[in-house]
Image (cartoon, rainbow, N blue to C red):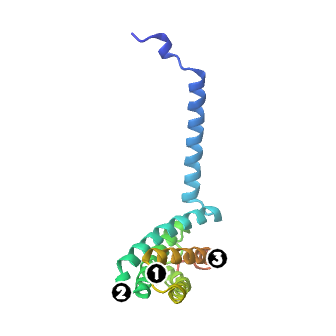
């Protein structure tokens, strides 16, 4: 037989349990709003997550192709990460897969990514002029900083231009 004292719950335990339940509910609601919401803040949060994933792919590709030289590795990384980012932005960030075709997302989003490619190429060339040969770690950090700044501009352009509420374009 169980001791009656062990069957009773302490008021402090109940209070902690209630706070934990309320917190879990708020976290679930926040995550659902971030996943499903179309407000700018939810889109920006998803944009940052997609940017992190595509930046990780960029870094892997850049390191894998660095033996070809910094500029070719930059191009391979930019193309691969742009293809991934544009598709994830179309489907997840802006929930536009029913409004914007894959081709349109790649064409228009890719056009915006060309600005980033030019900026990172110029940054790499400038670093080589100033510092000489640099390690892949320095190059990836430099490109990450430039890409972060361009990402803010890209978010605004994608939200206002590419993934708007227009009807689905064929492509």
Q: Are marks 3 and 1 in contact (CB under 8 Å)?
A: no
Spatial CA span between label 3 and label 2 = 37 Å
The residue that mark 2 highlights is: 68
| Any part of residue 40 in sight | yes
In this picture, residue 90 sits left or right of residue 38: left
Residue positioned 43% across, 73% down in the render = 59
- Quarter of the image for the N terminus: give it: top left
Q: Nearer the viewer, residue 39 or 24?
A: 24
Numbered tag placed on residue 164 in the rendering: none
| Any part of residue 165 in sight | no
Q: Position of residue 152 (x, y in %)?
A: 62, 73
Q: Earlier in the sequence, mark 3 or mark 1?
A: 1
Numbered tag placed on residue 160 in the rendering: 3
Viewer-nearest of discs 1 and 2: 1
In this picture, residue 23 sits left or right of residue 82: right
Q: Quadrant of residue 48?
A: bottom right
Q: Quadrant of residue 56?
A: bottom left
Q: Are marks 1 and 2 in contact (CB under 8 Å)?
A: no
- In terms of secondary structure, where does tag 3 sit? helix
């Amino acid at each position: 037989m169980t001791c009656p004292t062990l069957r009773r719950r302490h008021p402090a335990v109940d209070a902690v349990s209630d706070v934990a339940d309320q917190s879990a509910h708020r976290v679930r609601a926040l995550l659902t709003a971030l996943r499903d919401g179309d407000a700018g803040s939810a889109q920006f949060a998803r944009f940052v997550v997609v940017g992190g994933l595509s930046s990780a792919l960029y870094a892997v590709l850049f390191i894998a192709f660095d033996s070809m030289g910094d500029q070719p590795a930059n191009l391979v990384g930019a193309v691969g990460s742009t293809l991934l980012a544009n598709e994830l932005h179309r489907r997840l960030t802006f929930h536009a897969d029913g409004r914007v075709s894959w081709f349109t997302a790649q064409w228009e989003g890719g056009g915006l990514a060309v600005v980033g490619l030019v900026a990172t190429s110029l940054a790499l060339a400038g670093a080589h002029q100033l510092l000489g040969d640099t390690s892949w770690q320095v190059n990836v950090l430099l490109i990450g900083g430039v890409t972060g700044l361009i990402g803010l501009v890209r978010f605004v352009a994608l939200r206002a231009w590419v993934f708007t509420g227009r009807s689905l374009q064929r492509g």
